Amino acid sequence: MKKLMIYGAGGYTGRMAAANAKGAGVDLVVAGRPVDKEKISTLAEELECEYRLFTVDDVPDRDAALDGIAVLLNCAGPFLWTAEPLMRACVETGTHYLDIAAELDSYRLAEQLDDRAQAAGIMLLPGSGGSVAILGSLAVHAAKRVTAPRSLSIALHVAGGFSRGSAISASENVTTECLHRVDGSLATRSPEEVRDFDFGQGPATCFPVSLPDLITIWKATNIPNIETFVHVTDGAFPDGDLAAMPDGPSLQEREANRYHAAVEVTDESGMKVRSVLDTVNGYTFTTLAAAEAARRVLDGQAVPGFQTPAVVFGEGFAETIADTSITDL
């Protein structure tokens, strides 16, 4: 029971995560839908590993495919369609669940399934890589710089192009409400309430968005007031026919576009502290972090129930991934 399955391994992000996991020496199984058999079987041959095929809604095939799997890493977006059936399957089969979702509903679902996951002795870790791992590490680090944090404002700087899968997932999961956390509860806010964050090269205008970090940072820090923002470099989000997009950014494009994050934490006295994070391109970080998270879970670093990377692996998790650093201002 020491096998890792990566579902959606035929996609842009899934392929990179699978290669990273294989490089880390884990016992890997790549998986995907039957219609993607050629992609999955070719990848399995390249990585010299087993492959399995199933659709997330085919309960008998899905549960049979999870036999002997200790950890499932779901890389198959849109997670609107895959997170719920795979989370529930993991609870039923005793399999730890990880994914790379950036969609708020996946985290709400994990909250709802927390008791069942604890009873089953398995962990639900959506956001094992990507912005949740980046922002969670930065938030917990900054929160520890004050005695009694009351509010936290955090922003992610997205640079470079999107993968086709990410763009389609984002277009199908547009959150109609712009949310923030007020006194511990999620509440609506105006999407027009922009503010500047300095990621290290001067102020940049950031827009409020409903990131899953409204749930994960609150879980990791208990800070009652949290707001999340994004600054997207011009041209990063595609226009036109998303299906006609290339698979994803090239290696050269990823290397030319690093990601950044900035956080401001205010304590009960009104004192503010600020920290910034600098890291590799988001796709590079996500696939490295998710593979590393899965490796750690396989090695026994798991806590039953709904968890976040910053809680399970500690605030320094992001800084263990590639060239990532946090600076206090």
Image (cartoon, rainbow, N blue to C red):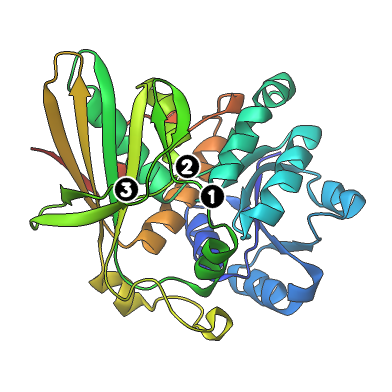
**Residue 212, horizontal then vertical, whole percent:** 47, 42
Disc 3 secondary structure class: strand
The residue pinned by badge 3 equals 229
**Residue 175, horizontal then vertical, whole percent:** 53, 51
The residue pinned by badge 1 equals 103
**Residue 222, horizontal then vertical, whole percent:** 39, 20
Disc 1 secondary structure class: loop
The quadrant holding residue 91 is top right
Q: Quadrant of the C terminus?
A: top left
- In the image shown, does 17 or 192 lie closer to the viewer? 192
Q: Is residue 292 left or right of residue 252?
A: right
Q: Are marks 2 and 3 in contact (CB under 8 Å)?
A: no
What is the three-letter code of the residue carrying label 3?
A: Phe
- Mark 3, other Cα within 10 Å: few <14 / some 14–19 / many ≥20: many
The quadrant holding residue 285 is bottom left
Q: Is residue 91 left or right of residue 231?
A: right
The quadrant holding residue 152 is top left
Q: Is residue 296 above or below residue 196?
A: above
Q: Nearer the viewer, mark 3 or mark 1?
A: 3
Q: Is residue 163 above or below residue 320?
A: below
Q: Is residue 206 left or right of residue 52?
A: left
The residue pinned by badge 2 equals 212
**Residue 156, horizontal then vertical, whole percent:** 30, 51
Q: Is residue 238 left or right of residue 111?
A: left
Disc 2 secondary structure class: loop
| Residue 134 visible within the image | yes
What is the three-letter code of the residue carrying label 1?
A: Glu
